[in-house]
Amino acid sequence: MPFLIVSVVYCLQPGAGAFEAGAAKTDITAPVGTPLNGYGARMGRNSAGIHDPIWSRALYLDDGETRLFLVSLDLVAINPELRQRVEELTADLIPPENIILTATHTHNGHGGMSRSIPYRFVSGRFIPEVVESTAAGVAASMRNAFEKRRRAALGYAVGTHQGLSANRRYPGGPTDEQLGVIVVEDADGNPISFVTNFAGHPTSIDDPDTFNFSADYPGFYCLEMETLLGPECVPIFLNGAEGNQTITAPENKSGWERTEAVGRMIARRAHEIAQTMTFSEPKMMLSQKTAPLPLTLATFIQPEEVVLKSLEINDLLISFFPGEPCVELGLNLRALALARGYGAHFSVGLSNDYVNYFVPRHLYADLTYESAMTFFGPGTEDWLYEQFLSLMLRVGADEEAPGQTPLPEPLLEEVDGGTMITVKGDSRSLGAQRGNAFAVDIQARFEQRVVQPVNQGDWVPDSGMWGGLPAFVNVPALALSFMGMGSRNLLKGISLDLMKEMEGMAEGARLPFEGLWLLQNAPLYAGINDKSLLYAAPICTMVAITGGRAGAESIIIGRNLDWALPEKGVITRVQPESGHPFIQAGFSWSSGVVTGMNDGGLVLCVERIQPETESLPQRAPVEFMLRDLLQSTVGFTEAVEAVKALDYIRNVHVMVAGMEEGKPRAAVVELGNPPVVRYDEDGLLLGVLPENTAASMATRKRYTTAKEILASQPEVSLEFLQQVLTGGGQPTVDNLERIWNAQTRHSAILLPTSREMWVAFPLASGNAGQFTRISVSGEAS
């Protein structure tokens, strides 16, 4: 297979110090009986034997101005306890910021080195002596490498491997074909170290050696390289963006034959790539920053900040990830680096710390192992790019230095009984403006609707794993994190623009993304397993008046939203950079649409007939799908078909209305199996038929009243419908059979022909306030 060689020749700058390098390795295999680390299924059980040793391999580099250690360990990850102890033991040798520790990610290295209780389920009991002996072995390899330092030269090249990796999650999905090589040799041309960068999970060891120590295929890479170059050369393996990458099975080999074949083939291919390499005494720059991590619900296992490092060797850039990036992130970061003018880029995962996985935004909603173990929200991808771009010393010719773009100020207006907000900009900015404006209210709702039920045990199962947790485990914190993982599939079907908008809203409200997402779905969660007393599902009244009965307007939609809990009524006018502007009536914290209309006059309203009590949907709840639909669609028929396609949703009615070819159209889509579509009869369409036995008796009586009043009117005016929806000024009572009742949170009338919405919120007395007129174009009165 053809491959690309990138060779760089640099001359030593006048007056600069001579380039020196040294390398050494130390056996750090823990005693048999030490727990293994890597697989949850092993539950942190003890090792049973040694198939091949576990090594620390250290490379010391010094260009006269920058000196550093690059250390590769045959472990699953670099945990803070080990890193800190290594830094203490080598403090007299080198500053800690000049140490790069990276793990090969073998799942058959030893554990026993994490104090974190959740991690102990995988890495086994914490054994201080194992931390001490491992750190001492790492320090010994570093000191030996330093003592062996001598005048040296360095070269690098990149080529391609021959199909040795595959996407382990999506057959035929993206892979990284690049094989990166760095070779360090002494003044006589003898190899000091041979470094190879390849992306693939070392998880190839099966029974009967599941409980035996082994370096997996990186160990065979090192053995083959020592055979090719001699035992004095120290091979170093740097795993790449391997989050969703595995190794293939050359010639259909299996077991140890597969493991050995892949390791040795990587070595031989890397050796071929290095044959035309040109060496020089390079210039190095090591950059690092301590970056605050995005907010997370998993505070019990994740730090608040993490150290990120990048190394420039001439025009080669190496980015060190503190966890497991999926291949898409490595490929994208490489493209960004090359655009900055670097000659080549390596991604190295599992370096200096471990904060689990990093998945791209478009895969975040897939409930895979990788996405479930990503704890910082879908915006983690952008956060990583921003951080690593800030460490790059080169800036593109047409690129401005990274900086924080100020948010536009939203327009806030108080209306009778509520608030109206106008937001404009890109998706993230739309959400951030809302989050900033209503941060206090959103945070309070999160505490009330999510945190309290978890703390009180209402949302925590009492069986299975949850029923047997020891007393010292912080169950609420663990439950919140697991709920965040479990809610991922509810994002399926949501557009990336809406996801970015919610990311911005979470950021503005200073909540973790998953905290905001759990708040959005709190009513759904609360209804499961008879928790409906915590949150009542929304009940509503929806009517459409069409044709001559609607008079000059030709179509009028009226709806009341009833909701058991007190809320801050908010009208949001959304003016996105792309798609259709729209207005919606809802709450401060809600990103989905329950009552809305766009600039094409398309109206969407939703009513839940019964709460879900048995199971959660496998994709996004209906209000988020309607939110995307409002921004992307104006056609009535297209909208009806799109709503009908939501066949995974049950017990929900959606009112769809608007103008089509100059004629008023209205339909109610009753989502079920199969969905049923009803159209207006004699100029009147009800959200629920009074004879529908699936609806509550209170709902049926509300619609009976609405039908009797509206059917008796040959023409229904805007003012008359306002009176009907708000009870005509009668005192508000706690009776859900009344159209306006103590649980009504807004009353809205939508006029598709003029693109106007009239909204009234309840006052402190419980009665309806004055109707506020809002147009999609921006007027309010």
Image (cartoon, helix red, strand yellow):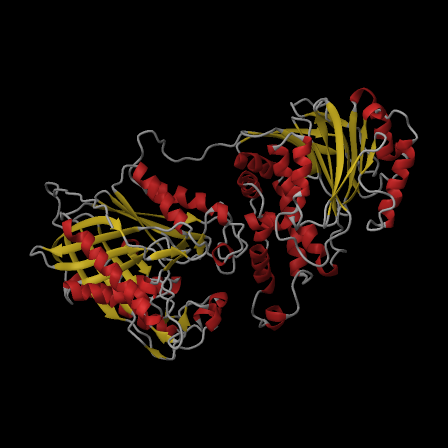
Q: Residue at x 41, y 58 (%)?
A: 354
Residue 603 in percent (x, y) is at 71, 32
Q: Is residue 631 left or right of residue 745?
A: left
| Quarter occupied by residue 459 | bottom right
Q: Tag count in the figure?
A: 0
Residue 119 seen from this side: yes
Q: Nearer the viewer, residue 601 or 548?
A: 548
Residue 288 in percent (x, y) is at 33, 48
- Residue that extends furthest to the front in the rendered view of this protein: 251
Q: Is residue 404 left or right of residue 747?
A: left
Residue 571 seen from this side: no
Q: Is residue 686 left or right of residue 511?
A: right
- Is the residue 696 above or below the residue 705 in the image? below
Residue 245 in percent (x, y) is at 39, 56
Q: Residue at x 50, y 66 (%)?
A: 118
- Residue that extends furthest to the top in the rendered view of this protein: 552
Q: Residue at x 54, y 50 (%)?
A: 365
Q: Nearer the viewer, residue 199 or 427?
A: 199
- Is the residue 255 above or below the residue 694 in the image? below
- Residue that extends furthest to the left in the rendered view of this protein: 188
Q: Is residue 685 left or right of residue 585?
A: right
- Is the residue 263 above or below the residue 703 in the image? below
Check the picture and name the quadrant holding the C terminus.
top right
| Quarter occupied by residue 456 | bottom right
Residue 606 in percent (x, y) is at 73, 41
